[in-house]
Image (cartoon, coloured by chain):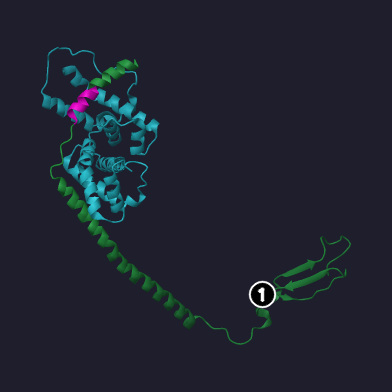
Chain colours: A cyan, B green
């Protein structure tokens, strides 16, 4: 359980069926959970739906929450899995170009050019954002999740493994290929910057 | 090589951190109301689900009672004393030349088979014969 005694009290009350206490817990975590989910699904409507689903799943599983993880970690774990599930179901990302070649990337390859050909050339910030988002959206749900957890939320490998319910080796492998893919996808952008 | 890769990745990571931002939740209280609404709805649902379950249980009991009743009514009842031949097997004769042996012989009706049951010996001596 968390260190916050107020949160611990709310959790005890919520477990005994007190929806008002659970309402307060939702208020404490809704923003964080929403932003976390959005990072993976990249869609506001889906993120909102999944935030609600996360809290509903949490309510149903409150009795099985043993307190070995913090409530925050537990909710993040539920939300990550919900986000990955949704992405798997949808499979809307453009796959053709990168999916088949994912395992063919040479681990020793240089994926980013050293210097742009034309120094000083610049592109619009909105365009950079669009291309970064496009590259990120081209990753599989699992790869997106691992990039968000490691590179944006700065979680340790162990914490990521716990959240995703997989081994450390799997986390490292996913992270390795996700990074390589992203670097490959953003190669042109690096050239233009 | 590793350092080089890390340097290269640092550039990509910086791009990700700068551009992969998440918007804030526009109507946060909407989340609370929808979640609590759903919890309330699910709390009511199990009671409604129990109602047909009760009916199912009663239907099951009625079906079993009905089946029992039909069995009693329609299955042919055996009347009178059973004849000897209806038994699965019967003792035909029993005789042993060695006093410590007990021999029983069972025969099935209509001479369809005979079982000889010998007690009191680990084996039958070669010179002995079964009659």
Above or below, B108 against A186 in this view is below
Q: How many callouts does the rendering have?
A: 1
The residue located at (32%, 16%) in the rendering is B3
Residue A61 visible from this viewpoint: no
For the record, the magenta segment spans: B12-20
- Specify whether B55 is left or right of B96: left
| Quadrant where the C terminus of chain A is found in the figure | top left
**Residue A32 on image: x %, y %:** 22, 39
Mark 1 neighbour density, 10 Å: few (under 14) some (14–19) many (20 or more): few
Asked whether B17 falls inside the magenta stretch, the response is yes
In terms of secondary structure, where does tag 1 sit? loop
What chain does badge 1 belong to? Answer: B
- Specify whether B67 is left or right of B7: right
**Residue B67 on image: x %, y %:** 44, 76
Asked whether B110 or A57 is in front, the reply is A57
- Specify whether A175 is left or right of A118: right
**Residue B123 on image: x %, y %:** 82, 60
The residue located at (28%, 51%) in the rendering is A59
Q: Which residue is mark 1?
A: B88
**Residue A163 on image: x %, y %:** 33, 38
Asked whether A52 or A13 is in front, the reply is A13
Q: Based on the displayed image, in which of its 4 quarters is residue A130 positioned?
A: top left
The residue located at (73%, 70%) in the rendering is B114
Q: Based on the displayed image, in which of its 4 quarters is residue A97 positioned?
A: top left
């Amino acid at each position: 359980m968390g260190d916050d005694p107020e949160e611990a009290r709310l959790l005890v009350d919520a477990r005994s069926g007190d929806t008002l206490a659970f309402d307060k817990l939702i208020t404490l975590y809704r923003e964080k959970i929403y932003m976390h989910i959005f990072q993976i699904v990249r869609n506001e409507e889906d993120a909102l739906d999944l935030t609600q689903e996360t809290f509903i799943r949490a309510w149903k599983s409150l009795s099985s929450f043993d307190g070995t993880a913090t409530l925050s970690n537990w909710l993040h774990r539920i939300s990550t899995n919900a986000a990955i599930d949704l992405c798997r179901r949808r499979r809307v990302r453009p796959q053709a170009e990168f999916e088949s070649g994912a395992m063919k990337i040479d681990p020793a390859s240089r994926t980013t050019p050293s210097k742009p050909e034309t120094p000083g050339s610049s592109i619009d910030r909105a365009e950079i954002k669009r291309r970064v988002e496009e590259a990120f959206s081209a990753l599989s749900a699992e790869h997106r999740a691992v990039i968000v957890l490691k590179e944006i939320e700065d979680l340790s490998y162990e914490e990521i493994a716990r959240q995703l319910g997989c081994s450390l080796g799997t986390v490292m492998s996913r992270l390795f290929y996700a990074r390589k893919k992203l670097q490959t996808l953003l190669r042109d952008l690096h050239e233009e910057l | 090589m590793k350092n080089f890769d890390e340097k290269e990745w640092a550039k990509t990571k910086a791009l990700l951190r700068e551009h992969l931002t998440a918007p804030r939740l526009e109507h946060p209280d909407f989340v609370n109301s929808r979640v609590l609404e759903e919890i309330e709805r699910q709390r009511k649902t199990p009671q409604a689900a129990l109602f047909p379950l009760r009916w199912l249980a009663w239907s099951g009991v009625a079906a079993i009672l009905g089946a029992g009743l039909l069995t009693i009514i329609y299955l042919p009842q055996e009347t009178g004393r059973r004849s000897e031949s209806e038994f699965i097997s019967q003792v035909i004769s029993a005789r042993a030349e060695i006093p410590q042996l007990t021999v029983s012989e069972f025969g099935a009706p209509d001479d369809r088979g005979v079982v000889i049951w010998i007690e009191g010996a680990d084996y039958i001596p070669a010179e002995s014969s079964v009659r």
